[in-house]
Amino acid sequence: MLYPTQKEILNIAKPNQIYALGVSSGKSLISLAHYKKFNHHGEPLLIVQPASKLKSKDWNREVKRFSDYHNININYDQISYHKLSKEWQKYKGWFVIFDECHMIKTPTSNMGKSAVRLSKHATQFCLLSATPASNGYQDCINYFIMFGFTKNKTQFLNRFAIYEDLFLGTRTVKQVADFKDKHILKNAFNQITIQKPTEYFVDLPNVTEKQVEFKASTIYKKAKKDRVFEFENEEIILDTPSKLAASLRYLTNQKEKLDYTKMIFESTDENILIFTEFKRERDDLYNLAKDTGKEIYEITGKDTCIPERDTWQSLKNAVTIVNYRAGASAVELSYNDIIIYYTATYSYQDLVQSKGRAIRHKGRPHVTVLNYMTKGTIEEKVYQALKNKKDFTDELFSEYVNEVE
């Protein structure tokens, strides 16, 4: 089931390992193969992950796909990082995968401390992230604790930290300015980490496409049933088909979509292209990109702001937010590594043309396409139509809203 380059990664892996692999490299698949290779005692598997990923059920699909292919049964459980501090003791003696492990890089946080405790009681463990140490060795302290390179943060800083004075009004405090003996730190990190960019996995398909699923929000269900809902202290009456259609598309589950997008923003510095429909979505995504330190570009009905072409090859950590009508055609966007369809378009032509903007000859060597789809909502019907290479029409919408619950 693994591609040759993925097999190469697994062949050099140790029982306890950090996989610092690029987006779309197949980290989840590699980690399941890691579990299969190093699980010698029949212990169950625990997958620790961000809450947004737990809700989207990404891992359920990966485990099922892996289990079906190998005709095996994997006894596994899942938990979010936010519940780790209260529940880690339940999983003593388990094999553990820490997905998006940059979330536990802070040794003084509850999540970081609990991850260390769990790792000490696991049979084996592996950590997954495209960017486990984006801020340098400061981010590696908790990993070094987990792998036994240092006892705690204090011991590590006493040995390696270089301090400088920081003047705060009338008082002076010491802050870490750099680290000494970096050759030792580099060697330690290399011993526990396998690092490969997305480009290394040249034998993977050029495009990886998957569906990210969410649950329907409570307000969506009410709006569909009652044709009225309260939003920001205002009662909205859905008394026309167009108003009902627009409201249902927007109300699917904005919170979970935004939480999942935040997780992606924080886990990679690859360039991300987001297609969306509504101004409120645009505002939320813009603010999120700003808060997470992304370089922001936009294509709206009024303006087109994209990076200069001569910077595309070296550009990183950028988010481009595009309205379908404005950016589905004519504008080339092949500097992006990840495409997110935040809101499904009604138009099959817009879908095809929008993909063509980013997936192009001599563009990025590998592109990941994420289709956000909220179960039990209009989005299911829209994607069904698009899969059949058709537009989602007024007639299909009328059939959907008149379905018997």
Image (tube, rainbow, N blue to C red):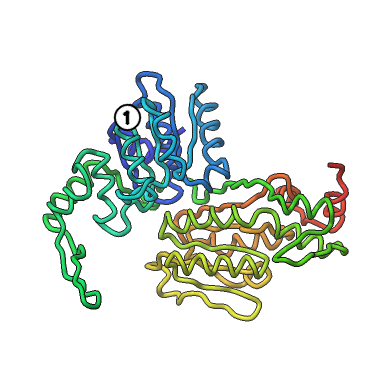
Q: Of residues 352 and 279, which is closer to you in this image?
A: 279
Q: Of residues 150 and 207, which is closer to you in this image?
A: 150
Q: Is residue 388 visible?
A: no
Q: Residues within 10 Å of mark 1 (few under 14, many from 20)?
A: some
> Left of 265 or right of it: where is 229?
right
Could you tell me the amino acid type at mark 1?
Answer: His
Quarter where residue 235 is shown: bottom right
Which quarter of the figure is the C terminus placed in?
top right
Q: Residue at x 52, y 27 (%)?
A: 69
Q: Estimate the x, y position of residue 348 in percent, counting from the top left.
A: 72, 58
Q: Estimate the x, y position of residue 265 in percent, counting from the top left.
A: 47, 59
> Left of 14 or right of it: where is 326?
right
Q: Of residues 205 and 335, which is closer to you in this image?
A: 335
Q: Residue at x 48, y 28 (%)?
A: 76
> Left of 208 or right of it: where is 386?
right
Q: Residue at x 72, y 63 (%)?
A: 231
- Is residue 360 depicted above or below 15 in this figure? below
- Is residue 151 depicted above or below 305 in this figure? above
Q: Name the residue carrying label 1.
A: 121
